[in-house]
Image: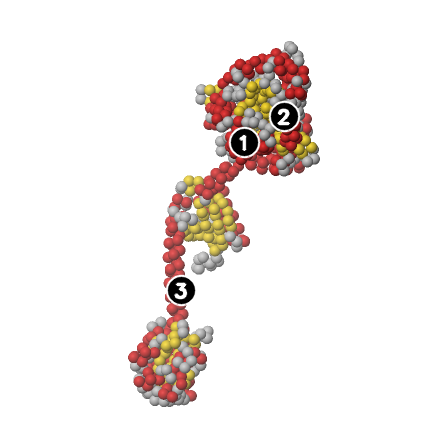
Amino acid sequence: MNVARLKKLLSHQQVILSKIALGAPLSEVLTEICLAIEEIIDDKTAMCSILSRQGKQLFHCAAPTIPQEYCDLINGVYIGDKVGSCGTAAFTKLRTIVEDIEISPLWDNFKDLALRFDLRSCWSTPVFSTHGELLGTFAIYHGRPKAPTKVDLELIDFFVHFSSIALEKNNELKKTKQLLASLQQSNEKFKAFTKVMPDLILILSEEGVYTDIYGTSNELLLESTSDLIGQNVNNLLPIKDAQMIMAVIKKTLATNEMQIFEYELDVPKGKVVFEGRAAALDDYHTDNPSQRHVVWMARDISIRKKAEQEVHKLAFYDPLTNLPNRRLLGDKLSLCVESIKQSNDIGALLFLDLDNFKRINDSLGHSAGDEVLVELSKRLNTIIKSSDTLARAGGDEFIILLEHVGKNTQQASHECKVLATKIQSVFHEKFEIGELAFQVSCSIGICLIDSVNAQTDNILKFADTAMYRSKNKGGNSSSFYDPALQTLLEKQTELETDIVRAIASNEFCAYFQPQVNQLGKVVGAEALIRWNHPKKGLIAPNEFIPIAEQYGLIQSLQNVVLRDICKLINELKSTNTIDNSFSVSINISQSQFNSSNLKKELFSTIKEFGVEASQIKLEITESMLSSDIEHTIVQMKELISAGFVFSIDDFGTGYSCLTYLSAFPVKELKIDKSFIDKILDQAKGFSIAQTIISLGKSLNLVVVAEGVETAAQYEVLSKMNIDSIQGYLIAKPMPKAHYLKWHNDKSDVHSLIS
């Protein structure tokens, strides 16, 4: 390169680098490069073109002497093999020299276009960034076929380098602008978000200075935002609150871990509970990078905390009295038991149940009963220590847990008796409801808690057992837990489980005891439930009927009896040994009679077996007729209208039936066996039996004598004009198969009673 050309190169280099340094537009810089090489290169027909890469395409950046139409036509050409000199150079990333466009296979698709504008050769060099990224291409066209000299290539490399600087700086400038735009957009979004978010964001320095504030309204700030920035928490907050905040800042910066915590502050809107989250924030101020900060998010969770408290209250406290409920008591009892195991002290649990509380609810309604319970809870609270727990277990039951009542059983028992007396004393004053006043009492069960008796479930069960012992004593008293009584209750529970199993296993059945009239004709029978236990054999009804009543199983047992009655009647009919006057009695308990299921079961069963309702006699006791007479009569008439017949069992053992007997639609009276046993005693049993028979006759009722065991008893009854008898004199109760045989063999048993 001669001196003149070198001077021109240096001159152009200075101009180009100056434009790049001063940030001239890219097109101006690249145009300067094109014009410079065209002036210096040793061919006046040389025309320079600089293309930039955007994705997979090449776009014109500068080509001052090439026809604009040509530039427009190839602008945006896709990079690829055999895509002219520039497309191929970008594709191969190698310099591509085409000396004659007309014969070059690289220009097959573009030669006509190039030749139309008299472009005959094209030397293209890929332009790379300092990191090796393809930025574009640098091309020299000529108006004639031509190959480059060594000097030409050296000169091209100079200007390719200049182009690389310009393109790379332009790309970096674009990226910077994009980054700034993105940052600006993010900043605007952040500002928008912080304006609407309910949380408060604070930037605090490690010294506790408020640096920046974002987010919620000033209602959650101790001062306005503008007044708060620059101030120190130690100067603004009470000492306790400031110490808490500084401790969190210190821990956050020391561990470099996010801290989550709750705290409470008095702010303009009142006392607020916050959930705080703090995280370390380094280099927040570029002018002071050594100073550390924390970002502190404060969320108002007052409503949530209040809701949690309400949920906790609903879960652990009785809504009526605000006393701990059974669940919370269970938790406290468990803690008490664990403490007693460690200390060997003695605690106690007192189970309280109001006596006859149901009468208040039934007579005045539950709201009145609630008033009594609330007042009682207030009275009981006045007599227990702060360390003790008073809970409402439900209904009219209260429980008092005493965590410490002594070091030994004697002392503990004494303290419990003293407290029981105090409890009883709160009932001395009547409970007033409106203008009415009620005298209420309670039964108390006491269970001592020691290292031996330390099972939570058992303690509650034992105290409950002791309370029922007080009930059985007539109420208004207290009792300590008695293991023997507990054993009895456990046996009853086991029996209840066994009854359920036996029902499912079809172990229950009906036995039948015949009834005969004075002429010796079998006129009916009484069905009696029996349990044929696989291990214990035949179990008498008095052993399981009370348990079945207590646990609501009596209807299931009676369903068995009712079905067996229907089967017996149908089998007797099939042998033509009975007529429609023959009936079978079934005992109906008080709970059954009051149940809405009785009619449903009766109707569905006789319908299933096709039995006439008139052949089913429902035996009820006198005591069942002594309460709610009007309702009882309505129930009886509904069943009578369907054809059923009523009989009063064990007549004469009650106290109120004689007054109302004529009002009840019954067809039969049964004299209790206790009177028949004494019928030969002219002074007592004879007179009672005679009176009942006379009463029955005067009311046009059939009178049946139960428990007739001797001919002498029958002879007396016969003289009294008894209608029918039932008892061992005729036959013992028999299972269905035996009864059928007996009935068919001895349908006329006059010889037995004559």
Res. 611 mark: 1
Q: Nearer the viewer, mark 3 or mark 2?
A: 2
The first of marks 3 and 2 along the sequence is: 3
SS for dot 1: loop
Q: In the image, what residue type sits under mark 3? A: Leu
Q: CA distance from mark 3 to mark 2?
A: 113 Å
Give the quadrant of the N terminus: bottom left
Indicate which disc, 1 or 2, sits on the residue closer to the N terminus.
1
Give the residue displayed 38% in from the left and 51% down from the top. Answer: 195
Mark 3 sits on what residue? 179
At horizontal 46% and vertical 75% (from top left) the residue drawn is 132
The numbered mark at residue 425 is none
Q: Is residue 696 above or below residue 147?
A: above
Residue 661 can be seen, yes or no = yes
| Relative vertical location of residue 536 with respect to residue 181 in this rendering, above or below | above
| Quarter location, residue 408 | top right
Q: Given this view, does label 3 or label 1 mark the residue nearer the observer? A: 1
Local secondary structure at mark 2: loop
